Image (tube, helix red, strand yellow):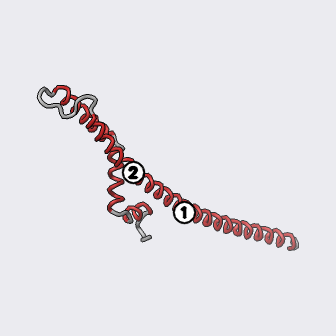
Amino acid sequence: MKLGKTWHQHHEDSLAFGQRLADSVACGMGSWRFIIIQTVIVVIWMAANVVGFIYHWDVYPYILLNLLFSTQAAYAAPIIMMAQNRQNDRDRVQANADYATNLEAKKEIEELLEKLNSIEIDKLDKILAILQNSEVKPKS
């Protein structure tokens, strides 16, 4: 990994075009914008077929509309699953990066504790030496 790049940037750079496309499709299909647009299209579709005096291309029970939804679902499910698998990969990479960071932090903390302990021991040794020297010296 190059310096200056986070694990997430490194992961994004490694994605192929198809993976980026699947992620963006899954992101779009999992949004309120998509739900609202699709709802508007369905309402217009139904209204056009109910009100259409001259030509009804998909009369009730809207078999063509159901076919379109089935086709959409058949393609959407695997694309969303691909995006979820990549999200699992990203989560795993992030967890490994967090684990490595935690190990480094633990090592640094342990080194600091050792240094603090050695400083404390040195201070105690100096205090003992001062006390011993003051006891040995005769009073004048």
Q: Position of residue 118 (x, y in %)?
A: 71, 69
Q: Position of residue 31 (x, y in %)?
A: 34, 42
Residue, disc 2: 78
Q: Residue 135: which quarter of the image?
A: bottom right
Residue at the location (62% across, 66% down)? 107
What is the quadrant of the C terminus in the image?
bottom right
Is 8 located above or below residue 54 in the figure? Answer: below
Q: CA distance from mark 2 to mark 1?
A: 34 Å
Residue at the location (32% across, 44% down)? 72
Q: Is residue 116 left or right of residue 35?
A: right
Residue, disc 1: 101
Q: Residue 128: which quarter of the image?
A: bottom right
Q: Position of residue 66 (x, y in %)?
A: 30, 37
Residue at the location (43% across, 63% down)? 6
Front residue of 33/43: it is 43
Which of the marked residues, 2 or 1, is nearer the chain's N terminus?
2
Front residue of 46/135: it is 46
Q: Are marks 2 and 1 in contact (CB under 8 Å)?
A: no
